[in-house]
Image (cartoon, rainbow, N blue to C red):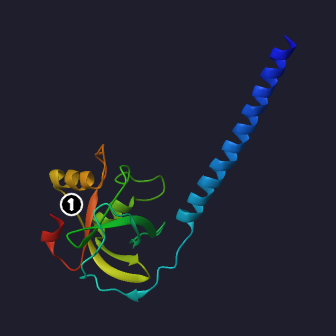
């Protein structure tokens, strides 16, 4: 009976140590994420040419920042990728829903499609054009290696000027 109690006490001690190590690692991991995404950036740079052919592959996760026409969180980080040289980004599945405090970025872009985008210390002027065709949206997300394609994800072509044909 005494050996059994020692074994149980050792097991419980090991579990406590493992639990503490796990909590510390989780705090460090999520702390880094918060710092990475919550730290405001300086939205400044030389003016970039939005008509360039973007070299990013369709499955790229190139960090870019959108400057939106809203008071709360006017600068957000998204991932950009290119399709046939045209820059694109997409929302997460919950982006169409308003937050408790403000509109989502997709709602803002719907009302104010002219946005500035910061990539590699250059600021580009774009029109964000939502890709409405469901078949096209699914194909793009499939090409980006989504196994399950949630309904809420919206894809935007970031185009210079008013070229409607590029977003379709």
- Which residue is under mark 1? 131
Question: Extreme left residue here?
Answer: 165
Residue at horizontal 60 percent and vertical 59 percent from the top? 32
80 shown above or below 23:
below
**Badge 1 local density, few (<14 within 10 Å), some, or many (20+)?**
some
| Image point (23%, 56%), residue name | 140
Q: Considering the image in quadrants, where does the C terminus appear? A: bottom left
Residue 51 location, quadrant? bottom left
Left or right side of 111 for 163: left
In this rendering, would 26 be left or right of 123? Answer: right
What residue sits 76% from the left and 27% below the top?
12
Residue drawn at x 80%, y 27% is 10
Q: Nearer the viewer, residue 28 or 94?
A: 28
Classify 167 as above or below 159. Answer: above
Residue 94 at x, y percent in the picture = 38, 50
Q: Looking at the image, which residue sits at the far top?
A: 1
Residue 49 position, x and y percent, is 29, 86
Seen from this angle, which residue lies furthest bottom? 46
Q: Is residue 47 above or below residue 28?
A: below
**Outermost residue toward the front?**
3
Residue 54 locus on image (x, y percent): 27, 75
Which corner quadrant holds the N terminus?
top right
Q: Position of residue 80 (x, y in %)?
A: 34, 67
């Amino acid at each position: 009976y005494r050996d059994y109690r020692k074994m149980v006490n050792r097991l419980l001690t090991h579990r406590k140590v493992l639990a503490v190590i796990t909590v510390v690692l989780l705090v460090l991991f999520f702390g880094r994420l918060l710092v990475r995404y919550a730290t405001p950036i300086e939205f400044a740079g030389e003016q970039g040419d939005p008509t360039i052919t973007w070299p990013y592959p369709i499955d790229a996760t190139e960090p870019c920042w959108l400057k939106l026409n809203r008071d709360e969180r006017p600068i957000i980080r998204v991932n950009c990728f290119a399709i046939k040289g045209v820059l694109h980004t997409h929302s997460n599945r919950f982006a169409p829903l308003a937050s408790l405090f403000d509109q989502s970025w997709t709602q803002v872009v719907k009302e104010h499609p002219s946005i500035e985008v910061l990539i590699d210390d250059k600021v580009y002027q774009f029109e964000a054009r939502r890709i409405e065709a469901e078949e096209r949206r699914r194909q793009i997300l499939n090409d980006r290696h989504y196994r399950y394609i949630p309904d809420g994800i919206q894809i935007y072509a970031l185009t210079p000027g008013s070229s409607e044909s590029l977003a379709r």
